[in-house]
Image: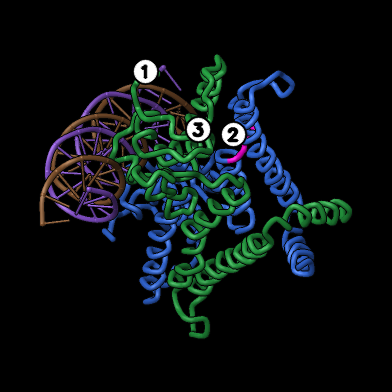
Chain colours: A green, B blue, C purple, D brown
Amino acid sequence: MKPSATSSDRDATPLTALPSVDEIRAAQDRFIEFWGEMGTRWGVQRSVAEVHALLFITGEPLSAEEIMERLSISRGSVSTTLKQLDEWELVQRVRSKDRADRREYHQAEQDVWKLFYTILRARKRREFDPLIDELGGCRVAQKSSRKTDRQKQHDQKIDELLELCRFFDGLANTISKSGKGIERASKILARVLGSSR
Amino acid sequence: MKPSATSSDRDATPLTALPSVDEIRAAQDRFIEFWGEMGTRWGVQRSVAEVHALLFITGEPLSAEEIMERLSISRGSVSTTLKQLDEWELVQRVRSKDRADRREYHQAEQDVWKLFYTILRARKRREFDPLIDELGGCRVAQKSSRKTDRQKQHDQKIDELLELCRFFDGLANTISKSGKGIERASKILARVLGSSR
DNA sequence: CAGAACTTTCAGAACTTTCTGAAAGTTCGA
DNA sequence: TCGAACTTTCAGAAAGTTCTGAAAGTTCTG
């Protein structure tokens, strides 16, 4: 919390110097650190998750400079990171109304459902879809061709795996098409499953 | 394929030297490499995934020595890797019927549903449950206490995130309790979702 | 209880990923 | 078209991860 003279009062909000500002900052820092840690477990780079956490939790559009200073990371990292978040559509670039200000400001998607769906979709593409695309190539031979018992056993295992993947793929598609309807659907599901045992 | 004089004919199966053996080996190798690659995307070490792939696709119990040679990895790696797979309950240690043979043999779970459930459960524990456990600590203050607007906004976002996590957690529990009923469950889900739009 | 037959551990080597910051690139107003 | 104000790139540094293999540990047999 250096008293650095950065341009940090773009908006007209009367920023009353509340004693609570530090409390919020501390809570934000806890969130940023935690989200960064979770990011590493979700296969996202720590710094990417941290930048996202900062933008999400403040809700405000921030410039690269501000992010750099707040998280103490390099200009280069901030740039790369924002590019990724932008591609993932978790962060949007917005321009200041002030035409003289040429910086880009970055604002995080605030709808938590959209956030989760975006993450889930990205993970499915990366971690699941290749199974369906490539597993077939791990068979010994065409379905119809003559095979020894061992070959049959091998191909059968690959096929079981493929079938399972296709099943989950269908399930995932059903869910992702449902949008928010999933909330209602899950209640029905719970009732149906609960009553049948 | 060095002609190393390892004891590799434990069972009484008449191992006829078919020309197809190489084809199977090649298919196994493709599978092992692919599974290893996918492993890295699923947050599993490449070598762990490779050992699992080998044990899964052969279906036979193999000794550490055999795994070492087949995959060209060190004794140490094989040991660590098997320990992990054992903890995950994806591989079991079995002993040869031959009392004189003191090696441990390692055999992979063959039921693909169990395989996926095990992986899913492990990932949920690692990547999801911490959200529910720790997110609360990222709030500014107790629900009831007096707060400024900014504090309220912050806590509200954390709460939204928490609520969403709890929802998915419930859904995951519902599904995992359903066991193989999931297949039926997913059809119900699809019908319910499909009819509502 | 000795020694053979295995398995586990762990320090350091090899490799991979991520980060930094200076330099190059882009965009815009005058 | 110039130069100020930003953003992006990229080579090399730092950090992090995974692997190796020799040595230590364990368990069993005789």
Q: Which residue is mark 1?
A: A3
**Left-right relation of B148 to A48:** right
**Left-right relation of B156 to C25:** right
- What span is in magenta? B128-132
Q: Which residue is mark 2?
A: B130
Q: CA distance from mark 3 to mark 1?
A: 20 Å
How many marks are shown on the rendered structure?
A: 3
Q: Position of residue B118 (x, y in %)?
A: 60, 48
Q: CA distance from mark 1 to mark 2?
A: 35 Å
Q: Position of residue A116 (x, y in %)?
A: 58, 49
**In this picture, is A5 found above or below B95?**
above
Q: Determine if marks 3 and 1 fall on one subunit.
A: yes
Residue A6 placement: quadrant: top left
**In this picture, is C25 found above or below A71?**
below
**In this picture, is A126 found above or below A48?**
below
- Residue depicted at x 37% and y 68%: B26
Residue C18 placement: quadrant: top left
Q: Amino acid at mark 3?
A: Ala
Q: Is residue B27 magenta?
A: no
Q: For the C terminus of chain B, give its image quadrant.
A: bottom right
**How crowded is the residue under tag 1: few (<14 C-alpha within 10 Å), some, or many (20+)?**
few
Instruction: Please name whichever residue, D13 or A24, is drawn nearer the observer in this view of the structure.
Output: A24
Q: CA distance from mark 2 to mark 3?
A: 38 Å
Q: Determine if marks 2 and 3 fall on one subunit.
A: no
* Mark 3 or mark 1: whose residue is earlier in sequence: 1
Say which element carries label 3. Answer: loop
Say which element carries label 2. Answer: helix
Instruction: Please name whichever residue, B89 or B39, is drawn nearer the observer in this view of the structure.
Output: B39
Say which element carries label 1. Answer: loop
